[in-house]
Image (tube, helix red, strand yellow):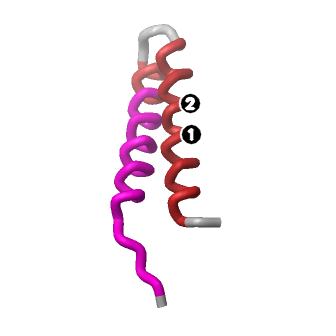
Amino acid sequence: MKGTTTSWIVAGLGAVVTGVGMLLPKGRTRTAALSFGLAHVALGLSDMLRPSVRR
């Protein structure tokens, strides 16, 4: 599996979690889901920008 594939999976999972968080009623659970999802989106996208090391 390519490195970018993993990054897309992480970012996509974060988008799904963020979307589910938007559907939850206001409260700690919603805030946690939104934060967790947005963090995964940010990590997945930043991982795509990281240069790869080939041997």
Q: Give the range drawn in magenta.
A: 34-54
**Residue at x 49%, y 44% (from the top left corner):** 11
Foreground of the two, 55 or 35: 55
Residue sitting farthest toward the right: 1
Amino acid residing under circle 2: Val
Give the residue at mark 2. Answer: 16
9 to the left or right of 49:
right
Residue 46, compared with residue 12, is above or below; it is below
**Residue at x 46%, y 84% (from the top left corner):** 54
**Could you say whether the residue bearing mark 2 is in a helix, strand or loop?**
helix
Q: Do the residues labelled 2 and 1 touch (CB within 8 Å)?
A: yes
Residue 23, compared with residue 37, is above or below; it is above
**Could you say whether the residue bearing mark 1 is in a helix, strand or loop?**
helix
Q: In which quarter of the image is residue 1?
A: bottom right
Q: Does the magenta stretch include residue 41?
A: yes
Residue sitting farthest toward the top: 25
**Residue at x 56%, y 57% (from the top left corner):** 6
- Residue 35 horizontal/vertical position (percent): 39, 32
- Residue 41 horizontal/vertical position (percent): 43, 41
Amino acid residing under circle 1: Leu
What whole-number distance in Å separates the C-alpha atoms at marks 2 and 1? 5 Å
- Residue 23 horizontal/vertical position (percent): 53, 12
Give the residue at mark 1. Answer: 13
